[in-house]
Amino acid sequence: MDEENRVVLRGRLIELDILRHTPGGVPILKFRVEHESSQTEGGEIRKVSCEAAGVAFDREAKLLASARLGSMLTIKGFIDRKGRSRHQLVLHAKHIEFETGN
């Protein structure tokens, strides 16, 4: 099954775990991002505010490990369930861009 699962999220980095490695030696880093925006839904403007848990591997994990909390960034990736939970989602970062001037 090859269904579309793409996410682009812009937000502020609010939490960073320590850089760890998988048993195979791949760097892995858990993080949290705070997002705020205005979205149009049903013809009305709606204020959106949320936090998202994320995980980055390899190059993106190393990039995030050197980031400062409070930095603005755009994350491109996909969502998956957290562990065995079907009700908690995690954003898997495949590409991270930091805004300049942070």
Image (cartoon, helix red, strand yellow):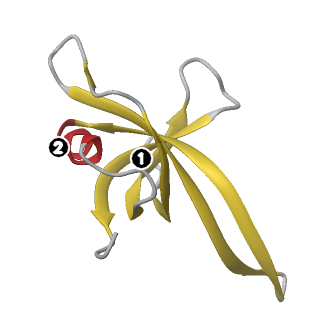
Which image quarter is the N terminus in?
top left
Q: Secondary structure at mark 2?
A: helix
What's the CA distance linking mark 2 and mark 1?
25 Å
From the top left corner, tell me how far across and down residue 33 is, in percent.
52, 51
**Residue at the outermost top position:** 23
Tell me the quarter of the image containing the C terminus.
bottom left
Q: Which residue is mark 1?
A: 2
- Name which residue type carries label 1: Asp
Please name the residue that numbered disc 2 is placed on: 59
Residue 51 in picture, x, y percent from top left: 63, 50
- Residue at the image position 28 percent from the left and 75 percent from the top: 100
Residue at position x 71%, y 62% from top? Answer: 49
Q: Is residue 80 above or below residue 50?
A: above
Above or below, comparing residue 89 to residue 27 in the picture: below
Question: Comparing marks 2 and 1, which lies closer to the viewer?
Answer: 2
Q: Amino acid at mark 2?
A: Arg
Residue at x-position 68% and y-position 55%: 50
- The quarter holding residue 30 reads top left
**Which secondary structure, mark 1?**
loop
Horizontal side of residue 18 vs 51, given as left or right: left
Frontmost residue, 48 versus 72: 72
Q: Which residue corresponds to the image point at 70% horizontal and 31% vertical from the top-left?
A: 87
19 on left or right of 45: left
Q: Which mark is residue 80?
A: none
Q: Residues within 10 Å of mark 2 (few under 14, many from 20)?
A: some
